[in-house]
Image (tube, rainbow, N blue to C red):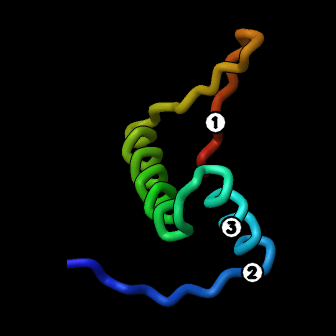
Amino acid sequence: MNRRLNVSFSPSAYATLEKLAGEKGKSMSEVLRDAIALEKWMTDATKGGRKILVEHPDGKVRELITR
């Protein structure tokens, strides 16, 4: 069963959400669901001291700091 949630955003956060939804061709609700899934994945991935790394097109690798 789906649940409804009423959320307040700052103007800049709302604008960012709106922009992301437009760029991805998704609804704002879909973008928020994706963000929640990504947050859960990052939380699970960094348990036990594991790191998330980002590789740039030039081959340089940097650690993504999540907290």
Judging by the rendered image, the residue that carries numbered circle 2 is: 10
**Circle 1 residue:** 64
State how far apart marks 2 and 1 are (Cα). Answer: 25 Å
**Disc 2 versus disc 1: nearer the observer:** 2
Instruction: Report the residue at 49% width, 70% height from top.
Output: 29
Point out the frontmost of discs 2 and 3. Answer: 3
Q: In which quadrant of the rendered image does the N terminus lie?
A: bottom left
Q: Which of 11 and 25 is in front in this view?
A: 25
Dot 1 surroundings within 10 Å: few (below 14), some, or many (20 or more)? few
Location of residue 45 in the rendering, given as x and y in whole percent from the top left corner: 41, 39
Q: Which mark is residue 18?
A: 3
Looking at the rendered structure, the kind of residue marked 2 is Ser
Q: Is mark 3 on a helix, strand or loop?
A: helix
Amino acid marked by disc 3: Glu
Q: Residues within 10 Å of mark 3 (few under 14, many from 20)?
A: some
Q: What residue type is labelled 1?
A: Leu
